[in-house]
Amino acid sequence: MMADDLLLGGIEAGGTKFLCALADGEGRILDEVRIATTTPAQTLGAAVRFFEDARDTRGPISALSIGSFGPLSLNPAAHDHGAITSTPKPGWQDTDLLAPFRHLVAAPLALDTDVNCAAIGEHLFGSGRGLDTFCYITVGTGIGVGIFVGGSAHGGANHPEAGHIPVPRAPGDADFAGICPFHGDCLEGLACGPAMKARWGVPAETLPLDHAAWDIEADYLAGLCTTLSYVVRPDRIILGGGVMQAGHMYTRVRTRLAEKLAGYDASLRALSMDDYLVAPTAGASAGLTGALALSYRTAARQWPMHWHAHLNVRDDSLHPQGMPLAAGGRDV
Amino acid sequence: MMADDLLLGGIEAGGTKFLCALADGEGRILDEVRIATTTPAQTLGAAVRFFEDARDTRGPISALSIGSFGPLSLNPAAHDHGAITSTPKPGWQDTDLLAPFRHLVAAPLALDTDVNCAAIGEHLFGSGRGLDTFCYITVGTGIGVGIFVGGSAHGGANHPEAGHIPVPRAPGDADFAGICPFHGDCLEGLACGPAMKARWGVPAETLPLDHAAWDIEADYLAGLCTTLSYVVRPDRIILGGGVMQAGHMYTRVRTRLAEKLAGYDASLRALSMDDYLVAPTAGASAGLTGALALSYRTAARQWPMHWHAHLNVRDDSLHPQGMPLAAGGRDV
């Protein structure tokens, strides 16, 4: 099948919205829809109808991929393969994400985490270009970590859940219990956006720049970056999400990371922190782009490295390579 | 070249001894030597002479691989590629391990960490057989972590140094400063063998079973296993080294690991800890075996999965698959 003939489906499945899109083999968006995340039946039903309509109008869908919130069951041998498993999101526990779409596509469906799909998007169009091994971190309502190793998103026995690692307490933060329903004071329990709000009583974005909250937050994120540096040995760490929208955080995290690495290992000592720890640049729809790229890879057995030349690039310094989903999408 | 014609060299380069061996394409040890680690010139000189003698006697060496203590510089693009870099071992900082051997072998020399080579040995002959992704931890004079991902030892931008991750203090261990010369109270600084001795004033092996030291140690090692579980998502964790010779430690670490994972992620919740966290079984010479296997892979472009059927297997429940190096080696 020529790339011209491909009809690729992608879904970015989030806790507040599902983004669904169709693209051709050149990465051009043909149609897209934004579906509010309510119940699994309603949300998945609307997504299925979008792709059924597309198939009826445009012909067979070549491949379909989903990047989803989790935890997911990604081991093909597991009895619950394809399901969202132990999510605290009401109604979504043990939801099979793949079964509703199986009748639509002859090729195997691809499923990975939202953050691994965003890492794919960064690899193709953003701060991960040309890199063999990198980490993608997003700090918002949770802390998600995607890991790219040797040219693919890393899975292992399932998928990374590095937001939940145990971490030492930051200076000045001995007493806050943390909010993770499973671990209490794991990294996510201490440092995600809602943890900041629970600790300080106000949303993070309302805290002044000289508030102690920011150095505490930077310490935790630098601790995560230290652990990822020593375990994964990435070429780069891409750090984004709502909490990082406070632009002053990059300097704080870089400074603490260099302190925590403490000159150990010559190759880490030689890094430029400005180049090692960076913001994402593939745009807000990197996860959807990554899902579409997974579909391309399913159909064409390689990453669509040519796509970036064909995308409509927004003139937006925060998201210079972003696909214009927000501008073109319909809401449902 | 047929496997029969191969002449494979391997070195396990440790802080107290260098083990050098020659094997044929079937994994049969043809000759071996044990060299005390003194100065780089003396130690590497003796190793070079061993392989020069072998070449003069037996003909060209097909491939040569080194598994070494570190940190190492493994990025081929680095100016110091092939060197031991920031080791505290006197005299060995900035020692090029590859240059002295280049004249011996036409094929590219392979270099990896001692723990990654031991992980290869476990993959071929021990507790990592049949596994795509696993971690190998050794807790002794330091804490070393080898990581096997997708059929190869993981490198990334350099090599894992997961012994140096930051960790929360174990209950009852708030005051000990840690002994890592770089980080103070990183995992290795708090939980390697010499850290136990520094904290309690006596060698770990002399501490009674009901001493608080063991639960503290188990907490730290379980913390490392938690972090590796969430970042790497291994099929299994292989945990060995001098500190784990106290056999009661396996039950303690498994119990604490299950507590720390806290039921998060259905696929981790479903694990049998007895099968997930296990002792190494490839024998004390797994690192040397791994280096020889790397040489086979350089020459034959695949792992020598057939070797185990040809090795002399010792009747030793601790090391059922070990190669009989200790019995057959000469000391120098």
Image (cartoon, coloured by chain):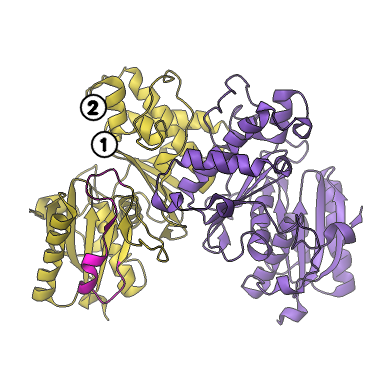
Chain colours: A purple, B yellow
Q: Chain of mark 1?
A: B
Q: Quadrant of residue A71?
A: top right
Q: Nearer the viewer, residue B82 or B145?
A: B82
- Mark 2 and 1 residues: CB-CB less than 8 Å, in contact? yes
Query: What residue occupies the far front of the structure in this picture?
Result: A210
Q: Mark 1: which amino acid? A: Gly
Q: Which residues are magenta?
A: B87-109
In the structure shown, which secondary structural element does the residue marked by tag 1 occupy?
helix
Q: Mark 2: which amino acid? A: Glu
Q: Is residue B322 above or below residue A304?
A: above
The x and y percentages for residue A318 are 75, 54
Residue B64 is a magenta residue: no
In the structure shown, which secondary structural element does the residue marked by tag 2 occupy?
helix
Q: Is residue A306 above or below residue A12?
A: below
The x and y percentages for residue B318 are 24, 42
Q: Which residue is mark 2?
A: B205
